[in-house]
Image: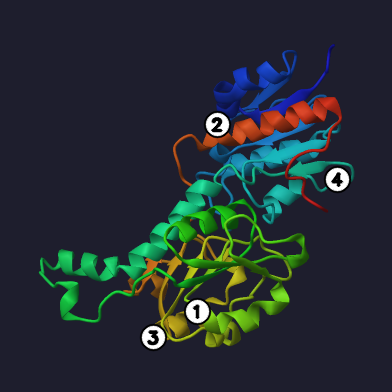
Amino acid sequence: MATGVTILLSATAAARHGDAIRAVVPDARLIPVPAEGDLPDPGDASVAFSTRDLIERGTRDRPAPEIQRFAGLVRSAPAMRWVHIHAAGADSRMFRSMAEKPGVALTTSAGASAHAVAQSALAGMMALTRLFPRIGEAQRRHAWEPLYLRQLPRDIRRQHAVVVGTGPIGQEFGHYARGMRMRVTGIRRDPGAGVPEGCDAVAGFQDLDALLPSADWLVLACPLTDQTRDMVNARTLALLPRGAGFVNVARGQCVVEADLLAALESGHLCGAFLDVFQHEPLAPDSPFWEMPNVIVCPHSAAAVEGLPEAVAEIFCDNLRRWIAGETLRNLVAK
C-alpha cells in the first residue's frame, strides 16, 4: 500500500540512513537538504528528521547555519505534521520552532545516548572521587606525589547519590552506581509511580530539600522545565553536607552558576563534573576552566560510536508507528 510519506532531512542523513528508512517505508520520498547552496522545495513533506550533523558547527546559544537553514525550511513546509529531533530534550528554541505550528507533533531521541551520558557521569564522579585532577596536575609538573601523603580519597562504596530525573539517563546511571555499591535515590515528578529501575528509593521534587543533607553526590539528569530551572542555587547547595560532589549532565540552566562557583571555591563542595553550562561555548575567561576541583566536559557526555544509528533506529520505529497510526515514542507535550 502506498504511504505517500515525504521526509525532509539533511543530505548527510539521507546518505547515511536512507536504506534504513526505506526498509521501513519502501516508497518513502526523501528530500535531502544540502548544507549550503539553494534549498529544495519542501513540496508535500509531512515529516522532518533533524540529525546531529546539522548542529555540530554551533551551540545552543550560537546555532549553526545548517540547523538554521533546515529549521526555516521545515517551518515553511505547508504539509508538515511531524518533526523528529536527534536530541534527548526538546527545550531548545530552535527545535521547538520547527513544530510551532498547530497540528505538528514533535518527538525526541531520548534513550539513544542514555548509556553514554550515564557512563560519562559516573566517570566524572569516579575521577573526582579518586582525585584524578590532582594526579593530572602533578603529572604536568613531573611531580611524584603519592595520594598517601595528603588527604586520602573517600571510598565510594555506600555513598548516597541523589539523582534528579529518572528517565533513561537517570535509570542507567543508577544501575552503574549501584554496581559500585552506592545507594541511589531517584527524584521524579510522580513518586507514586514507583521506584524506577536503577534506584533503591524514590522521592518527589518536594522531598529534595529533606534528602540533600544525606547526599554525597547530587546528580542532575533531568529535562529543563519551569520546575528544574535554577533549582541548584545557594540555598540548595547549602543543604548538601560539606564535601559533597555535584554532577550535571542535564542543562546548564538548571544551575545558578555564581552560586555553584561560590560553593566550589569555599570548599563546601569537593568538586563538580559539568557537561553543560548556562552559555555555550563556555567563555574563555570563565573561572570553571581553572578550578582544580572541576572537570569541564564540552557538552560531550553523549558522544559515543554508533550514536547516529541509534537515533535513526528510534526515528524509524516512530516512522513505522506514524504510518500505522500508532502513538509515537518520546512525544513532546506542547
Disc 4 to disc 1, C-alpha distance: 38 Å
**Circle 4 is placed at which residue position?**
101
- Residue 229 in the image: x percent, y percent? 67, 71
The N terminus appears in which quarter of the rendering? top right
Q: CA distance from mark 1 to mark 2?
A: 36 Å
Identify the residue at horizontal 55%, vertical 31% (top origin).
309
Q: Secondary structure at mark 2?
A: helix
User: First in sequence: mark 4 or mark 1?
Assistant: 4
Side of 269 where 277 appears, left or right: right
* Mark closest to the chain's N terminus, 3 or 4: 4
Instruction: Sort mark 4 into few (<14), some (14-19) or many (20+) by Cα contacts within 10 Å.
Output: few
Q: Nearer the viewer, mark 3 or mark 4?
A: 3
Which residue carries the number 3 mark? 267
Rounded to the nearest angstrom, the CA distance separating label 2 from label 3 is: 42 Å
Residue 228 in the image: above or below residue 170: below
Could you tell me how many numbered marks the image carries? 4
Q: Secondary structure at mark 3?
A: loop
- Inspect the image, locate mark 4, and give the three-letter code of the amino acid beneath it: Lys
Instruction: Give whichever of 238, 16 is nearer the camera.
Output: 238
* Amino acid type, label 3: Gly
**Mark 4 or mark 2, which is nearer to you?**
2
Q: Are marks 2 and 3 in contact (CB under 8 Å)?
A: no
Task: Give the residue number, with chain letter if any, for mark 2.
Answer: 309
Task: Report the residue at 57% width, 80% height from top.
Answer: 212
Q: Upstream in the sequence, badge 4 or badge 2?
A: 4
